[in-house]
Amino acid sequence: MGVLNVTPDSFSDGGSWADPDAAVHRGRQLLSEGADIIDVGGESTRPGAEPVGIDTELARVVPTVEALVGDVAAAGARLSVDTRHAEVARAALAAGATILNDVSASLEHVAGEAGAGWVAMHMLGEPGTMQDDPHYDDVVAEVRAFLVAAEQRGRDAGVDEIWIDPGIGFGKTFAHNWALLGALATLVDTGIPVAIGTSRKGFLGAILAEADGTDERPGPEDRLEGSITTACWAATMGAAMIRVHDVRATVAALGAVATPHGSGGA
């Protein structure tokens, strides 16, 4: 799943693809790099983000979806809408998206009505406050229970295609994120397809800084090594969907990991 943020304030690439023509160009680039899904988002959900109005989000998302439908279909790929608002989800699905990437895990009825796939993500609180001292007694058990219940709600709402996402960085500390990554098999073992997004996130900056022996954390665009490493880990643990900014590099790394030993090369 390739990330296409058509926002001015996303944590990693905010503003880069806010222009409609730039957004379409970027979407086509992600397809050419090997993305199976283009995930279009019009509201930043980074820690501390302020919500935007529905009309603003619609104006960002729907034209982009409409402009990319033909290219995506020709590539045999799919379009996803990354939103927590029912109005935006309905409009984007009507415009040609076929997956609802739902950070609120509350829009199963919208996906069911549209016959769309649904990604149900765990988030503790709201984007503006979710990193204000998040607490769990057992983060793995609590997130797992939440997601299993969400999947059942989706089935009850008539959704046939469901992924569950532990929500790395969404109301979690550094330790919570690592616990969830380390226990990813616990989610995979539910039998529900697992989606995950670690790409360019802040906890990777902390790890890369420690590896370099420095207190200076690299910015989002300089976290490629951590992004690829965690993507490969997730894939080997059985994740079905991996959400990334750097599609070409991730596809290449995943291909290398999947290559049987002894098949050639240095």
Image: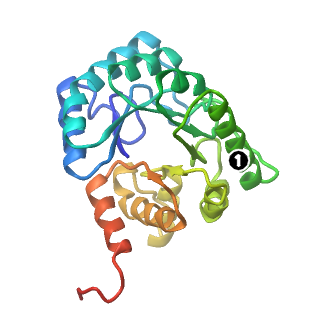
How has the structure been colored for display? rainbow
For the point 26% across and 32% down, which residue is it? 17
- Which residue occupies the extreme top position in the image? 55
SS category of the residue bearing label 1: helix
The residue lying toward the viewer, choosing from 139 and 105, is: 105
Amino acid tagged 1:
Val
Q: Quadrant of residue 190?
A: bottom right
Q: Quadrant of residue 216?
A: bottom left
Q: Percent x, y for residue 115?
A: 47, 27
Q: Percent x, y for residue 44?
A: 45, 30
- Which residue occupies the extreme right position in the image? 137
For the point 24% across and 89% down, which residue is it? 266
The residue lying toward the viewer, choosing from 50 and 238, is: 238
Q: Say above or below: 227 vs 105.
A: below
Q: Is residue 27 left or right of residue 196?
A: left
Question: Label 1 belongs to which residue?
Answer: 143
Q: Is residue 13 left or right of residue 21?
A: right
Alpha-carbon neighbours of circle 1 within 10 Å: few (<14), some, or many (≥20)?
Answer: many
For the point 73% across and 52% down, which residue is it? 139
Q: Percent x, y for residue 91?
A: 40, 16
In the rendered picture of this protein, how many numbered marks are placed on residues?
1
Q: Using the rendered image of the protein, determine whether residue 68 is visible from the camera's viewpoint.
A: no
Q: Using the rendered image of the protein, determine whether residue 106 is visible from the camera's viewpoint.
A: yes
Q: Say above or below: 48 vs 263.
A: above
Q: Is residue 37 left or right of residue 74?
A: right
Q: Percent x, y for residue 145?
A: 75, 46
The residue lying toward the viewer, choosing from 203 and 157, is: 157
For the point 48% across and 71% down, which residue is it? 211
